[in-house]
Image (cartoon, grey):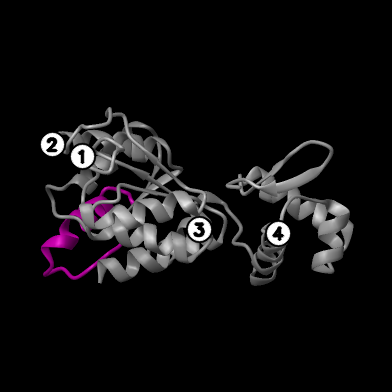
Amino acid sequence: YGKEIAFQIAKDLSNSGLTIVSGMAPGIDTFAHLGALEGNKRTIAVLGTGLDEKSIYPKSNLKLAKKIVENGGCLISEYKPGTRGRKYTFPQRNRIISGLSLGVLVVEARLKSGALITAEYAREQKRKIFAVPGSIFSQTSRGCHFLIKNKAKLVEKAEDILLELRIKPKTKKERTENNIILEALKEGALSIEEIAQKTKLSPSKVATLVSILEIEGKIKDLGGKIYALSNR
């Protein structure tokens, strides 16, 4: 239940232009990152360990960590290389997750859980708090219901979050046009006129989309209005 919801909402939010921030822990975190990678690609993982391969937890997510970086995202940690995860390091890093975010979504949580710690940090940092309802018989939904009772925004789909944040979802056409430009730039750096020729979009349309992609960090201006992918 929770993994499926985390994947779908992260994918939909990602496709609407948002960057998904999570902790790359087993379960909900992992599926949030996977959903983002399935969507608009970029996601940030805040770790409770050092950034070196020997320290990253869980080991099963080493491939995920590499995929996050390869797709324009990043791994963040306040701990030096060689730092293994401890009981306190994971809850402590949660303040960074909420601090980097416009809001925090709790998909599943027990009454005593790391997710509720993140929600408390979000409250202190004046971030939006969202929660997904679940079965009244499920222990892993009790934390979500507690948050909803205490004025968290109830979420059933990504649009509930976008509405609260006053963000207009990108249309399928906009996403397609953006992807066409990104595909063209995979061949190398191009000017607006060259992008227009390759994509069959008008120069004015390309100029608008290029500005948006640059703000989103997906492309960069090399100087003289020549653009390239940011991760090249």
Q: Horizontal and vertical percent for residue 55?
A: 22, 40
Q: Residue at x 56, y 60 (%)?
A: 16
Q: CA distance from mark 1 to mark 4?
A: 41 Å
> Of the residues shown, which amino acid type is indicated by label 1?
Phe
Residue 150: say if magenta.
yes
User: Could you tell whether 161 is left or right of 169 in the image?
Assistant: left
Please name the residue that numbered disc 1 is placed on: 90
Crowd rating for badge 1 (residues with CA inside 10 Å; few <14, some 14–19, many 20+): some
* Placement of 220 over or under 26, stated as above or below: above
Residue sitting nearer the eye, 205 or 2: 205
Q: Horizontal and vertical percent for residue 110?
A: 14, 55
Which label is found at residue 41? Answer: 3
Which of the marked residues, 3 or 1, is nearer the chain's N terminus?
3
What range is drawn magenta here?
Answer: 132-153
Residue 99: say if magenta.
no
Please name the residue that numbered disc 4 is placed on: 187
Crowd rating for badge 4 (residues with CA inside 10 Å; few <14, some 14–19, many 20+): few
Disc 1 vs disc 2: which is toward the camera?
2
The part of the image, by quadrant, that contains residue 175 is: bottom right
Q: In terms of secondary structure, where does tag 1 sit? A: helix
Q: Residue at x 17, y 38 (%)?
A: 85
Disc 2 vs disc 4: which is toward the camera?
4
> Of the residues shown, which amino acid type is indicated by label 4?
Glu
The part of the image, by quadrant, that contains residue 133 is: bottom left
